Image (cartoon, grey):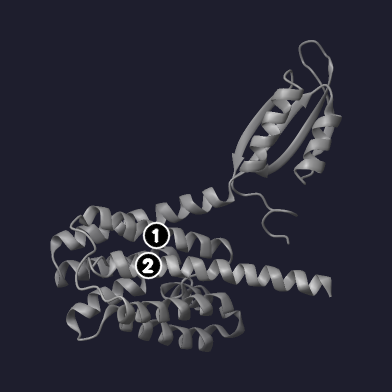
Amino acid sequence: MFKNGGKLIRTLEEYGVLTVATLILVVGVYVFKFPNNFSFGGVTGIAVVLSAVLPVSPGTITFIINMALLVIGFVCLGTSFGIKTVYVSVLMSVGLSAAEVLFPMEAALTNEPVLELIYAIVLPAFSSAILFNIGASGGGTDIIAMILKKYTKLNIGAALFLVDMGIVAASCMVFDAQTGLFSLCGLLAKSLVVDNVIESINLCKYFTIICNEPKPICEFITGKLGRSATVYKAEGAYEHNQKTVIITIMKRSQAVELRNFIHINQPSAFIAITNSSEIIGKGFRGFN
């Protein structure tokens, strides 16, 4: 019963994060992307271009395309499609449509297109990074990528990039060169921001500690920080003294505590700290 309760709590927490990340995405797209006609890829980029030539709002077009892609995804991918992606896709579509009704925007929020471009890139990219990090996506062209991966041997990244470039080119023709260039900048910057945010979220500190008295340090790691460590004996190359090497990995906030503890209690210890964003194992990614 306790195990099932813990699983339910984790699920609720996960969907809470999904909801917050999706709302951030909605704000970034509706407030900063749509009013400025920024169209750097994805379903929302297509919606921006189509709304300029059709008597339909970008939010409505996004809703129609996302729902159509969800149906296609269920037909082509079946149960492997992913309930998280469905949840995010529906919530985003409904959120954009609701925002158009509740908070109509007749013009851009400010008169600074560069500032708005930054927010139009950073907010959706930050949201996408959170979604990718917990095994979800914003739907849309990600669904197309899943289908291409299953049924073809195409390079998915290159195929989607070409589609995004086509959307940017269309924005140049439908709007003007300035809007197209802004959209191109957004397209090039988006992937960099997503990668950097994911790396920052997962960033851990890898400690290699060489000391004479390992017991207090290990007790602090296991008792105070709730982490574990690997301990082994070593010999110094210069004086051939016996040393103990402690290897441990933890989050950044815990790393500060450990560093300070060692500095105060064993100032003679040698510490090497390395950044890593790919730690897979119990207590980190890949395990509950």
Q: Determine crowd level at label 2: few under 14, some 14-19, many 20+ residues with C-alpha closer than 10 A.
A: some
Residue at 32%, 61% in the rendered image: 120
Q: What residue is disc 1 on?
A: 123
Q: What residue is disc 2 on?
A: 27
Q: What element carries label 1?
A: helix
Looking at the image, residue 132 lies above or below residue 149: above
Residue at 39%, 70% in the rendered image: 26
In the image, 30: left or right of 15? left
In the depicted view, which residue is nearer to us: 283 or 260?
260
User: What is the three-letter code of the residue carrying label 2?
Assistant: Val
Residue at 73%, 27% in the rendered image: 262
The x and y percentages for residue 208 are 71, 32
In the image, 157: left or right of 103? right
Residue at the top extreme of this rendering: 239
The x and y percentages for residue 21 are 49, 65
In the image, 111: left or right of 156? left
Depth check, mark 1 against mark 2: the one in front is: 2
The x and y percentages for residue 270 are 71, 22
Quote the CA–CA distance across marks 1 and 2: 8 Å
Q: Are marks 1 and 2 in contact (CB under 8 Å)?
A: yes
The x and y percentages for residue 38 are 25, 65
User: What is the three-letter code of the residue carrying label 1?
Assistant: Leu
In the depicted view, which residue is nearer to us: 201 or 68?
201
